[in-house]
Amino acid sequence: MSRISIERKEAILKKLLPPHLMSVAEVSKEEVISRATLYYWRQQLSQYCRAKGLYLEQIKNWKNECMQGFKSSKEQEAKAKKQAKEDKLEIKELKKELRYKEKALAETAALSKVWSPRVLLCTYK
């Protein structure tokens, strides 16, 4: 009994699924693997998917996305640096605006003390 690698097993199972959609008999002859083994593998895959509430296409998509994520890590780092730079600039601008508003509020408070409503009422009577 020879051991078949996981990658090889996946490649063989792909032949049983769309778009290839080969029959078990065809794959069995082509790969020189018993039909019972192929049926068992397909059953295992189906059971796993049903137990997890997944579809086979979802698993394939997740695998591809994960592999793409590992390949494009430099791109992700560049995007993260750019985003961090933009965030720092925005924070700087917001702090500047906050300081300006605090100064304006302090000035308004000081003027309201100097020009209190009582002083204004006394001068107009």
Image (spheres, rainbow, N blue to C red):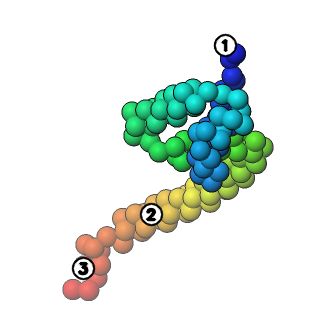
| Quadrant into which the N terminus falls | top right
Amino acid bearing label 2: Leu
Amino acid bearing label 1: Met
Q: Mark 2: give few (<14), some (14-19) or many (20+) Cα within 10 Å.
A: few
Amino acid bearing label 3: Leu
Residue 12 seen in the figure: no
Q: Which mark is residue 60?
A: none
x and y percentages locating residue 79 in the rendered image: 71, 51
Front label number (3 vs 1):
1
* Residue at figure coordinates x 59%, y 44% from the top left: 23
Which of pointers 3 and 1 lies earlier in the amino acid sequence?
1
Q: Name the residue under label 2.
A: 105
Q: Which of 19 and 81 is in front in this view?
A: 19
Which of pointers 2 and 3 lies earlier in the amino acid sequence?
2
Q: Residue 121 carries which label?
A: 3
Q: Is residue 114 above or below residue 46?
A: below
Q: Mark 1 points at which residue?
A: 1
Name the secondary structure under disc 2.
helix
Q: Mark 3: give few (<14), some (14-19) or many (20+) Cα within 10 Å.
A: few
* Residue at figure coordinates x 28%, y 82% from the top left: 123
User: Mark 3 and mark 1: span between their CA atoms?
Assistant: 105 Å
Quick check: marks 1 and 2 in contact, CB under 8 Å? no
Say left or right for 116 vs 69: left
x and y percentages locating residue 22 in the rendered image: 62, 47
In this view, the residue farthest toward the bottom is 124
Q: Which of 107 and 80 is in front in this view?
A: 80
Say left or right for 59 vs 66: left
In which quadrant of the rendered view does residue 67 lie? top right
User: Mark 2 and mark 3: span between their CA atoms?
Assistant: 24 Å
Name the secondary structure under disc 1.
loop
